[in-house]
Amino acid sequence: MSQMLSMTDVTVCYDNVEAVRNVSLSVDEGQIVTVIGPNGAGKTTLLMAAIGLLASRGSMVFRGSDIRKMSVEDRVERRLCLVPEKRELFSDMSVADNLLLGSYSLRDRSGVQKTLDEVYDRFPRLKERQRQAAGTLSGGERQMLALGRALMAKPALLMLDEPSLGLAPLIVREIFRTIASLRDLGVSILLVEQNARAALETADYGYVLETGEIVQSGPAKDLIHDPRLITAYLGGH
Amino acid sequence: MTSDIAAILAIDGIATGAVYALVAIGTVLIFTVTRVIFIPFGDIAAFTALTLAALDAKRFPGTGALVVALACLATLIEIISLVRSGELRLLPRALLFYLVLPLAVVGIAWLTMRIDPPLAVRLVLALMLITPIAPLLDRIVFRPIADGTVLLLLTVSVALHFALVGLGLLFFGPEGVRTEPLTSFSTEFAGVLISGQTMLIVLAALVFSGLLYLFFDFTLVGKSLRATAVNRTGSRLMGIRPARAGTIAYLLGSLMAGVSGILIAPVNTVFYDSGFLIGLKAFVGAIVGGMTSYPGAAIGAVGVGILESFASFQSSALKDVIVFSLLIPILIWRSLASLHSEEEIEE
């Protein structure tokens, strides 16, 4: 199994404050890797640095290329995609246009219609609402659109920032089912979540990030039974 | 005022307003994509008129030298920026866009001038010569401060306008120009004489607005520009480069301003510094649309044109005062209408 993304000793600073310190993690091809941790641990910062919206130190290699100094757009062209916590949809534009823009970075446009059909098959709700403005969708539909839009870029590695945030439990289950099914498409996933239980149930491997540092890592099926994590994040006793 | 006079003034106002509408749409386009209130748009319109007049007089226009100077400066800045960021692999592309293409445009214009081209070709040449100016200015002036506040960008934009007026005097001289009407056709409608030029102005405004609408709604590049305007971070995450979107916006905006310059040149005498008032009145129109709505800007600009026409009949000396006084109630209305905008931005 080849390595998709490898971060070594990555440090991200806001002004002079280190929000993420010496973080090393890797995602293999076809793997779902999750980073869990409390609010403010630096999870979002880590993803922002991975996509290039924040500058970082250390090493960042994606599919064999050093991407640390690349622009966001160059990383997206290499099929590294992020669905951010705020979704960042084009609220005034239709669902169909949002999805079409997801494919903007693809040079070969011949498969766009087929990918669009696949996204509509995966999220029939989006097909029903394809003419509607993205800003008028419900929270769950917006998350589906954000996911669908990212899939339009045919990502090799999809990074998801808190996909379950603010959604009803039923929708959360649906979103995690979709994430698990993406693995079958050959998409690798780096999932950042506060909902640690759902994340570890879906993922193959997990990292625990606290105050900007990785404090624990291991196969997700082991972490989910770890007594310390059960007490701290999994609501157990 | 009789109804005849009112009709004449209204038609005159609609024609002037249509010219302002083209510039206003360009202003909104640039603002939404780049956050720059591009004050020199009026100057671009005036320079197009002056370029066309020079071509009509069989002189090679000063615009050529201006484009060459800007292309060299932009190329130099781009090379320095590529060296600093260690991205020298992008050098051939930079040379093509910032040096070869603008120089090719000037070269083509210069060569075509040798064969005494007909009016249609001269119009195309004038537009070709004018369109690289704003994208080059963007690279030289605005790209380095693209992340600055809207106020900073506006201040620089005003300074740029004054610099351009100076360059306009240098390249075109102090004389005013008025070009030949594009058509001598005229017709009478309900007892009012309507000139072909007036009809052409309104038609051109409608056609170009329509083309822009089609571009935004039916092409991926057009949609990417709208996306950049709606959500800059979101569009970057799709691989849409804001700098490239900005360049396309400047090119399109310049084209709109250029067309308005060509349309206004046979109707008004245009000087090197005439652009400021055109740009400012278009800006008033754009503000009516909240600087974000294209139809709003177009309607606002036509409104400004009509108001100006009636104001100049009532009191020629005070017409600009009356037009710009319109800004006060509009700004009060807009500030009341957008009281909740901050809440809307916070998702």
Image (spheres, rainbow, N blue to C red):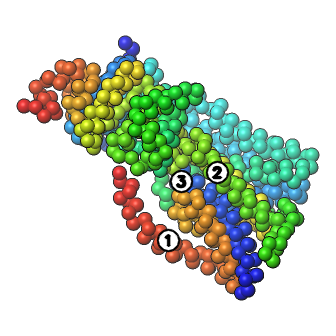
Q: Amino acid at mark 1?
A: Leu
| Residue at 36% over, 44% down | A86
Residue B280 appears in the rendering: no
Question: How far separated are the C-alphas under marks 2 and 3?
Answer: 15 Å
In the figure, is residue B109 to the left or right of B210?
Answer: right
Question: How far separated are the C-alphas under marks 3 and 1?
Answer: 18 Å
Is A237 located above or below residue B31 in the figure? above
* Chain of the residue on which disc 2 is drawn: B
The residue tagged with tag 3: helix, strand or loop?
A: helix
The N terminus of chain A is located in which quarter? top left
Asked whether A14 or A29 is in front, the reply is: A29
Q: Residue A53 location in percent, x, y?
A: 41, 39
Can you identify the residue that label 3 sits on? B32
| Residue at 35% over, 51% down | B347
- Mark 1 or mark 2: name the one nearer the start of the chain: 2
Few, some or many residues within 10 Å of mark 1 (<14, 14–19, 20+): some
Residue B331: image tag: 1
The residue tagged with tag 1: helix, strand or loop?
A: helix
Can you identify the residue that label 2 sits on? B212
* Chain of the residue on which disc 1 is drawn: B
Q: Amino acid at mark 2?
A: Leu
